[in-house]
Image: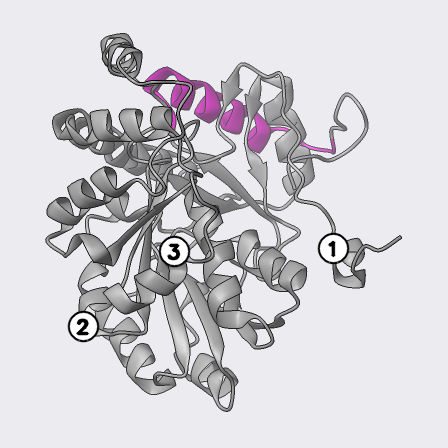
Amino acid sequence: MTIRTAVKALAPYRFTPRPEPIKLDQNESPDDVPALLKQRVVRALSDVAWNRYPDLGPRALEARLAQRHGVAAEAVVVANGSNTLIQAITIVSALGRSVITVAPTFAVYSAQAHLLGAELVEVPLLPGFALPARELVAASAGRSGVLFLANPAAPTGNLFTESEMERLVEAVGPGLLVVIDEAYAEFAGKNLEAMAARHENVVVLRTFSKAFGLAGARVGYALAHPGVAEELRKALLPFSVGAWQTAVATALLDEQGLVTERVRHVLAERRRLSAALAALPGVEPFPSEANFILFRVADPAAWYHRLLAAGVVIRRQDHLPGAEGCLRVSVGTGPENDAFLAACEAAAGASGPLEGRDGTDTQR
């Protein structure tokens, strides 16, 4: 076969959908887009010629986002999800070079490095999932390419401060493109988008999948120096953002009050979940600034399957370096969170392993 060796050696991204009714495993918004808003999007699409290609690039949406962030339209790049932007950034900056990141972190960074033949350098997070700034600077010495950092971090949920990120950018110098992936920024109440304006080699990524509740639409965007943004667009396929994606993202931008209220709900429920988990014997929840909570238990496999038996699906993370014994739960609706906590109370009081119905561990 004429398939590249690096591609054949790469394990595919795996996700096993579960039939359990309470789904708290993918860091999604717990609430769908309201029916009236969906109807508004459908009406807007009725005026669009479906037999015609969409705009080469979604420039109207980029202009709207530029206004939202107070930057030039040339500094915004909208794509078919932030994953697509991660791939495009790797193409334009890391081919034949290096992808540097931390571990554990979002798996797409390493996957794209392997797929595209870039050198992958993973630096372990420090105790408490702290930023290994000194080690990242050392790893960057003599290398060019991309440094990816999720902030708030995933899957750990903690937030790196602006001062430590600023020092890191200055220390690694202009030889690396520093990408700050802010998929969960709305839940942190803080962001580093101003760094993209101050530093030509900083790119900030955002998504509509989390706080906006549009995971099904696949819309993400980058804030970058206009010169970097121009190069980034070259790696994106033409006409890749469809009319529906543009219409629904624009509609949600008109509903900031709805988004703000949903974020407020997540923050309140996140506090409640963290406190309740901390009160359970043998459970260690970690501080989170995202819409999920990472927590450690003695037997994560048994916990995972006991929650499945109660109709609740969460995500195992215990296979990740530095996350041994850990599970991750997304913040859901109030009733969903109640069911999760009830299942946790039962799991904390139980003993002994419980195998899944098919005898396997999934959601790893």
Alpha carbon distance from label 1 to label 3? 26 Å
Residue at the disc numbered 1 = 10
- Residue 26, percent across and down? 49, 34
Q: Residue at x 27, y 62 (%)?
A: 224
Which residue lies at the image location 71% right of the left edge and 45% below the top edge? 12
Disc number for residue 198:
2
Local SS, label 2: helix
| Label 2: few (<14), some (14–19) or many (≥20) C-alpha neighbours in 10 Å | few
> Splitting the image into 4 quarters, where does residue 56 fall?
top left
- Could you tell me how far apart the alpha carbons at marks 2 and 1 are, in whole angstroms? 37 Å
**Placement of 320 over or under 336, stated as above or below:** below
Q: Which residues are drawn in magenta?
A: 332-353
| Secondary structure at numbered mark 3 | helix
Residue 312: within the magenta? no
Which residue is nearer to you in this view: 182 or 18?
Answer: 182
Dot 3: few (<14), some (14–19), or many (≥20) neighbours within 10 Å?
some
Position of 147 with respect to 296 (left or right) is left
Q: Is residue 190 above or below residue 101?
A: above
The answer to whether residue 29 shows anywhere in this view is no
Decide whether residue 338 is among the magenta residues: yes
Does residue 247 show up?
A: yes
Residue depicted at x 40% and y 30%: 53
Residue 72: x %, y % from top left: 15, 56
For disc 3, the marked residue is: 233
The amino acid on which the numbered mark 3 sits, given as a three-letter code, is Arg
